[in-house]
Amino acid sequence: MKNKISKIIVITAIFSLLISPFFPSLDTSAVEINSNVKNDNNLLIKFDNNPPGKPETPHIERADPQADYCRNIDYYFETRTSDSDGDKIKYGWDWNGDNIIDEWDDNYGNFYVYAEIDTAHEFVNSGTFTVYVLAEDEHGAKSEWSDPFEFYICPNCAPVFIHPLDGLDETNVGLKTDNDWPYFLNIWDPESEQLYYYFDWGDGTNTGWITEPTATHRWKEKGIFTIEAKAKDEHGAGAQSPYESWRFLTVNVGPKAKIINFFKIDLFKNLQLSRLLDL
Ligand SMILES: [Ca+2]
Ligand SMILES: [Ca+2]
Ligand SMILES: [Ca+2]
């Protein structure tokens, strides 16, 4: 097999030299032969393969560009380029600015054609990072590196409210004074730190800082109360959503029947009006 491939190489080289005076624009140095192939049908001879273009400077699209970059969060780095031969390409990412590829994104083996791509990556450590990307076509030709994308990963990010303050009773109307009523916060912290929670029940009492996201309360008096709740991580960074640090919920202790009566009165009036208008 090796002899056969060698013969083809020699014949191809001689042929190229013979015809080059008649075709001066033909670049014989661009002849590429894949000598790793296992059978003759896979023998690859490719003329003038161009590398992909320089990829666009990577960037991250985020809902809130003002927010800090955090550790342990998947960010989607976007870029794009194309190959003038129409070849499929893959992208090599350098996550730490040393111009050594740390991760290939080949679209799960399918490679890419011209399109904006995004590759997810999370950083475990804080600090300033420089990211580069290059593209390689299906024949192994590499582009130059993109321009750098620099950004700062914060040592500690604030927790985030991922659900409103809520209780087991959906309406929070007509709560009885002889029951303990549970309320809970749902909060996520990028660094998975110990979180602390605080519930103010609106009647002059509160839980103080506690380690559980759930607390119960029994109101002794009837009335309308506003629960205020907040949270913080172990470094004291307060939970936000995205800029508010408190969550509020109004509850109505006692007068459920009164509210239903108002509703019935309104309904009755509407019925009477419908009859008058003959709707
Ligand atoms: Ca190419
Ligand atoms: Ca690297
Ligand atoms: Ca945190």
Image (cartoon, rainbow, N blue to C red):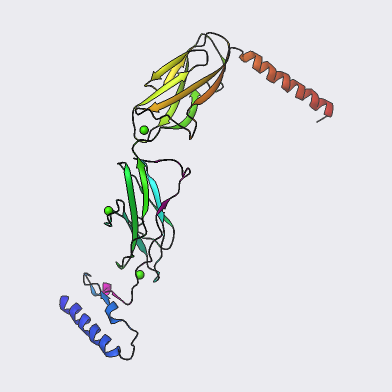
Residue 269 vertical position relative to residue 47 in the rendered view, above or below: above
Residue 177 vertical position relative to residue 59 in the rendered view, above or below: above
Which residue occupies the extreme left position in the image? Answer: 3
- Report the span colored magenta: 41-68
Residue 161 relative to residue 88: left or right: right
Magenta residue check for 58: yes
When asked about the image quadrant of residue 110, the answer is bottom left
The residue drawn where x is 41% and y is 17% is 208
The percent coordinates of residue 125 (x first, y second) are: 30, 41
User: How many tags in the picture?
Assistant: 0
Q: Nearer the viewer, residue 113 or 142?
A: 142
Magenta residue check for 225: no
Residue 32 relative to residue 6: left or right: right
The image quadrant in which ligand 3 is located: top left
The percent coordinates of residue 216 (x first, y second) are: 45, 16
Residue 93 relative to residue 216: left or right: left
When asked about the image quadrant of residue 252, the answer is top right
Whether residue 168 is visible, yes or no, is no
The percent coordinates of residue 62 (x first, y second) are: 45, 46
The percent coordinates of residue 152 (x first, y second) are: 36, 45
Quadrant where the image shows the C terminus = top right
